[in-house]
Amino acid sequence: MTGSVRLLHSPGGRATAFLTAGGLLAGSAVIGLLPGMAGASSHREAPLLLDDPAVDNTDVYAFSSPENEDNVVLIANWQPFEEPNGGPNFYPWAEDAEYLINVDNDGDAVADLVYRWRFTTHDRRGTDTFLYNNGPVTSLDDANLLFRQSFTLDVSYDGGHTYGHPVAEGPVAPSYVGPASMGSAQDYVDNLRDPAITSLPGGGQTLTTQTEDPFFLDLRVFDLLYGGDLSETGEDTLAGYNVNSIVLEVPKSEVAIHHDAADNPVIGVWSTTTRPTLRNADGTAASHDYTQVSRLGQPLVNEVVVPTGLKDAFNSISPDMDAAAADGAVVDRVLNPEVPALIEAIYGVPAPAGPRYDVFEVFLTGVVSNGVVDVDGDPATPNPIDVDLNSQALNADADPAAFQPSEMLRLNMSITGPTGLDMQPLPEASRLGVIGGDIQGFPNGRRLADDVVDIELLALEGIYDVSNVPADRQGAFDALQDGDGVPVNDNEYSSVFPYVAGPNTESVNQGGGSADGAAVAPAGTGGQPGGSGGSAVWVPAAAGSAALLLMGAGGVSLLRSRTSTRARATAQA
């Protein structure tokens, strides 16, 4: 199957994605709709990254700020599986790497803004000691803190070719060493993490810090899909581990076309890491040319759908290359995903008929009302999510002719309200995001509490509305509605910046103990994690009849007018 991907437009100007005669996705342009592979969302997924964890992107999140609806929050994580007791060097940022968050606001798959963090190390240990610190550390400038890092942030407006003057410089919150070195978990947050928050021009802020890994899932999918009888579920594989995190909050107008977030509310986001093309024997940069070595947008893409032989290639290219011609075998894996076939073979639940053009739109173009994908003039397969939701083609000032299907995380920034990250247990709030009736959640951006494994597993099975499951998919829903049995994270998130929890403080084989003092919820339970503060955040299971209905005649209508100042959802009984 060879050819091209093109975007067609209705008379009203709305873009619709089509896969034209013989069209194909490149080996890199694939759809992440499977439970995680070895690691997690993108943890240790590619051969070359196994030897370079400091530049390994793990997860990307994008959501409207729960503190200020005029701001957007972008979070990117690196360096998976940080064991809290991993001294003596712990987990520094790579000094010769560039850590990037990319934003495409017009849908051409080329970054319109690139935020770049670079790090400088200040290591005073020398030949005197192996210790990270030689006494208790009570502040970022404490003389006892022997290993420190600082960051420089600058921004590019031409896809990363050139950068302006730095917009911010500041300290990095160090790795948590232990109670004798840095006090209690709350001491760490108060003395070392929060003081590292750095203000940005125009009202934004950023933080580079170690945090507990906010992703949650059970990885025992490899034992014949959770044991062959779904008995091997309910264990959060990432509980107790940390990651390095960059949190960025900026005004929505900063990332929108023409700084107009009302008429142009949809953005695409992905993170990348670059390394010097040439490095000296001691690991220092030998040239000023940098090569992209890691990439992450949608969760669960590279490590699951992309074959091992193409994983490093995916990490090296940008989204605008995703639609280039490549091996048709990968396209077959995308349009005819493996997991439904395995579920059918193991559990006897029939797989949805392929090719899966519904998946193509949801994950490569964003969701638009009545969007369809067509091949060789055959009848189109409609997208079951009948709503104008999160395609950059909905932006009033986007050039329809330039739209390019590509893999990235897409967010409609105009969708805000009481079901954001600071949600209370309202009936319309759902850990299952859009398919649970909650249009603020994944795949419309990604909140920290979105249960992306269960969402993607249900989507693979053709279930896009858990309150109105098609009759022919009821058997699949009955078997898989609990997914991997891990509906919540092991630590609480926060409703205030930086939203992520502090790093875990106990060794993994002891479990629990996040550095923000939050209690740990038992893995596999659906209850609210314990804790004493008002910042606790939880997402209830998908609501029943009270949930917002997104599909069919009961669908929500969003952005029907591309010049409206805010997309509004209307629930119908």
Image (cartoon, grey):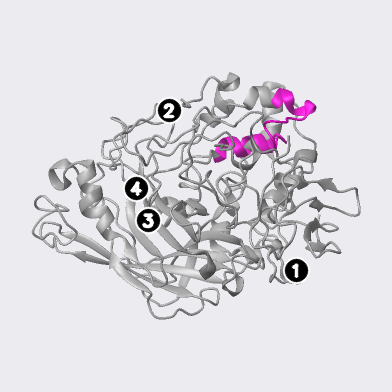
The image quadrant of residue 96 is bottom left
Q: Is 18 on the left-hand or right-hand side of 248? A: right
Task: Tell which of 361 and 47 is nearer to you.
Answer: 361
SS of the residue under disc 4: strand
Task: Tell which of 99 and 171 is nearer to you.
Answer: 171
149 to 88, vertically: above or below:
below
Going by the numbered disc 4, the residue's amino acid type is Thr
Going by the numbered disc 3, the residue's amino acid type is Ala
Q: CA distance from mark 4 to mark 3?
A: 14 Å
Going by the numbered disc 2, the residue's amino acid type is Ala
* Residue 151, numbered circle: none
Q: Which residue is tagged 2?
A: 523
* Residue 400, numbered circle: 1
Q: Are marks 1 and 2 in contact (CB under 8 Å)?
A: no
Task: Tell which of 369 and 407 is nearer to you.
Answer: 369
For the point 31% across and 46% down, the residue is 502
121 to 476, vertically: above or below:
below
Q: Give the residues in magenta.
A: 452-476
SS of the residue under disc 3: helix
Q: CA distance from mark 3 to mark 2?
A: 28 Å
Q: Which residue is tagged 4?
A: 211
